[in-house]
Image (spheres, grey):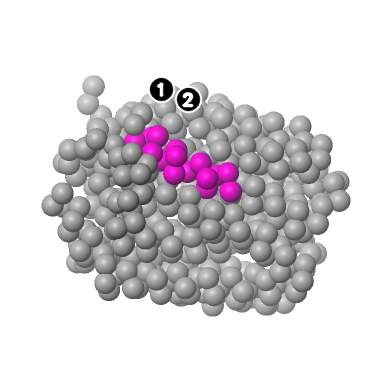
């Protein structure tokens, strides 16, 4: 039976729910850092290693996962990944020492690495150039809501019932969601949204050669690594920063670290998707323009987050940071799909996540943890603004010199 015209938005809503648990599960551990530190006598550097273990495995697996999902049903990869990471999330509650935590965090990274290459490729075949940024921007809001939910409820459950129960709750709900959605999610034809005929999937070597010679891909991957570095700083260290500096409870530290920034990001992502679709009609670099503006305008708020001693000022800084972060986030994959054909979009998302999480997310928790031990978490967090500025300038270079030619190459191939 042919799907209804609105089904393409129903798909985004279903994937939104899956992505919610993708981020709630990975965020939960950061809100219980103080409990883990007390129970297992962990240093800040060791806590940082928990964040990095997820990011490193997630990043190492992403390019392989992306190439794999270009060859199989993306529905299978999405729902299989959901069940895998949800079960691993529940198993984290079995941890009794630091080694156990590292193992389960790394395993969860492997389970989650299939989701974004498969889901972004699938959305791109339901939404063409007219609605792609809006669809992906709406999907991106699940990241923010999931982060809020994971941060707050893990802290709340941990505060009253211990840190283990939160992992059982989030993982169990994810398993139930996968069972329900298996009946409703449908696989589209690759290239359907743009009336393109997908070619034969590229081998890993062929795709990497393509990505290297496509300068816009290199620019977007580099900018994503920088942006992900800063985002991981927020996800991993802001709850503990608030707990230590402002003496907030676990629940309030988890909520404050996520609520204001993520709600502002939600608004920024919605606006970023709309602006990008509008500017794309005028220029091939329209989506990247929105991204660059988000990074450069967000950098001062990153500095303020780490330096202020006032909670109201901190909240204002989190809102500013979050809003401009959302402008960037709405177009992470929509921008790269401008210069990548349908048969390689899983691999493209995988490459973005591999570099972004290894060079960005994999290093940020440990670097900021080390700097925090030496100079304090506030200055360490503020220093991440330099990375935002570098990413914004890199995108501007891509807009000026590369994107027009690379977009034209896809349309005539």
List the single residue furthest toward the left: 412
Note whether 398 is above or below 162 in the view shown: below
Quadrant for residue 286, please give it. bottom left
Query: Looking at the rendering, in which quadrant would you find the N terminus?
Result: top left
**Residue 97 in view:** yes
Q: Is residue 348 magenta?
A: no
The picture places residue 168, in percent across and down from the top left corner, at 69, 32
Residue 185: x %, y % from top left: 37, 29
Q: Secondary structure at mark 1?
A: loop
Q: Position of residue 393 (x, y in %)?
A: 41, 74
Camera-side residue of 99 and 4: 99
**How busy is the neighbourhood of tag 1: few (under 14 within 10 Å), some, or many (20 plus)?**
few
* Distance in Å between CA atoms under marks 1 and 2: 6 Å
* Residue at x 18% of width, y 56% of height: 409
Q: Mark 1 and 2 residues: CB-CB less than 8 Å, in contact? A: yes
Magenta residues, start to end: 56-70
Q: Mark 1 = which residue? A: 183
Main secondary-structure element of the magenta-colored stretch: helix
In the picture, measured across the screen, residue 175 lies left or right of residue 4, that is right
For the point 48% across and 25% down, the residue is: 180
Q: Which mark is residue 180?
A: 2
Residue 399, image x and y in percent? 29, 70
């Amino acid at each position: 039976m042919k799907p209804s015209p609105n089904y393409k938005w129903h798909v985004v809503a279903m994937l939104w729910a899956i992505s919610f648990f993708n981020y709630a599960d990975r965020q939960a551990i950061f809100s219980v850092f103080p409990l883990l530190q007390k129970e297992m006598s962990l240093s800040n550097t060791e806590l940082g290693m928990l964040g990095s273990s997820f990011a490193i495995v997630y990043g190492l697996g992403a390019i392989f996962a992306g190439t794999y999902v270009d060859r199989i049903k993306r529905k299978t990869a999405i729902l299989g990944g959901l069940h895998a990471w949800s079960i691993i999330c529940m198993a984290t509650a079995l941890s009794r020492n630091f080694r156990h935590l590292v193992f389960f965090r790394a395993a969860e990274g492997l389970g989650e690495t299939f989701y974004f290459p498969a889901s972004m490729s699938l959305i791109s075949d339901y939404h063409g150039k007219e609605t792609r940024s809006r669809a992906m921007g709406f999907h991106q809001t699940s990241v923010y809501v999931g982060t809020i939910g994971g941060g707050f409820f893990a802290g709340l459950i941990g505060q009253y019932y211990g840190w283990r129960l939160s992992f059982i709750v989030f993982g169990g709900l994810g398993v139930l969601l996968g069972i329900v959605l298996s009946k409703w999610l449908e696989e589209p034809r690759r290239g359907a949204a743009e009336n393109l005929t997908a070619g034969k999937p590229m081998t890993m070597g062929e795709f990497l050669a393509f990505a290297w010679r496509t300068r816009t891909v290199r620019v977007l991957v580099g900018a994503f690594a920088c942006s992900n570095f800063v985002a991981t700083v927020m996800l991993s260290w802001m709850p503990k920063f608030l707990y230590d500096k402002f003496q907030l409870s676990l629940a309030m530290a988890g909520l404050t670290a996520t609520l204001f920034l993520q709600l502002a990001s939600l608004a920024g992502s919605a606006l970023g998707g709309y602006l990008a679709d509008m500017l794309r009609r005028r220029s091939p670099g329209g989506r990247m323009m929105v991204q660059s503006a988000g990074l450069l305008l967000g950098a001062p708020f990153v500095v303020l987050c780490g330096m202020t001693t006032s909670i109201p000022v901190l909240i204002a800084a989190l809102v500013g940071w979050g809003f401009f972060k959302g402008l960037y986030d709405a177009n992470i994959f929509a921008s790269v799909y401008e210069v990548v054909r349908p048969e390689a979009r899983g691999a493209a998302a995988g490459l973005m996540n591999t570099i972004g999480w290894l060079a960005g997310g994999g290093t940020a928790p440990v670097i900021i943890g080390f700097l925090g031990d030496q100079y304090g978490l506030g200055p360490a967090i503020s220093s991440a603004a330099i990375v935002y500025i570098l990413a914004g300038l890199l995108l501007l270079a891509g807009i000026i010199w590369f994107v027009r030619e690379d977009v034209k190459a896809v349309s005539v191939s």
